[in-house]
Amino acid sequence: MGTTDKVLRITIAVTLLVLLFDRNFSVELSVFFFLFAMLLIGTVLNGNCPAYKYFRINTNKNLNDKARNHARDRALIKNYLKNYYDSFTGIEKSIK
C-alpha cells in the first residue's frame, strides 16, 4: 500500500469519526461509520488491503521500483555471466 493510499485512508477514517461524534446519526449508521473507519485504520496499520490482493492491485511505488531494479540487476548479471562464459570458452578453444 502506497503512501498516498495510506494518507487518503486515514483522512477518510478521521472524517468519518469526526462526523460520527459531531452529528446525530441513527445507531445503525453510526456503527457502520465506526466499523468502516476502524477497517480503514486497520488496513493502514497492517500495510495491505485484502481487496487489493484479490484484484492484484499494488499502490506501493517503492515495491514496484524494487521489482524493476531486481529484474534489471538479474538481466545485468545474466549478461555478464554469458559474456564471461563466452570469453572463457574462447580462451579454452584457442589453447587447444
Image (cartoon, rainbow, N blue to C red):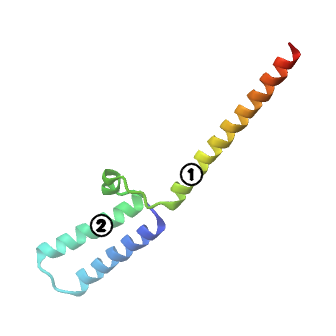
- Residue at 18% x, 75% y is 30
Query: In this view, which residue lies farthest toward the right?
Result: 95
Residue extending furthest toward the top: 96
Q: Please give the label number shown on residue 38.
A: 2
Left or right: 11 in relation to 95? left
Q: Earlier in the sequence, mark 1 or mark 2?
A: 2
Q: Compare residues 6 and 69 and report the one nearer the observer.
A: 69
Q: State the residue at coordinates (12%, 75%).
A: 27
Left or right, 4 with respect to 80, comes to: left
Percent position of residue 28, x then y: 12, 72
Name the amino acid, label 1. Arg
Vertical placement of 75 versus 17: above or below? above
Please tell me how many numbered marks the rendered image carries: 2
When the figure is inspected, residue 50 is found, relative to residue 35, above or below; the finding is above
Foreground: 89 or 9?
89
Q: Position of residue 24 (x, y in %)?
A: 16, 85
What amino acid is labelled 2 in the image?
Met
Residue 3: percent from left, percent from top: 48, 67
Residue behind mark 1: 68
Q: Crowding near pointer 2: few (<14 within 10 Å), some, many (20+)?
A: some
Quadrant of the snapshot with the N terminus: bottom left
Indicate left or right for 31 with 58 as reference: left
On residue 37, the disc is: none
Could you tell me how far apart the alpha carbons at marks 1 and 2 are, in whole angstroms? 34 Å
Quadrant location of the C terminus in the rendered image: top right
Q: Residues within 10 Å of mark 1 (few under 14, many from 20)?
A: few
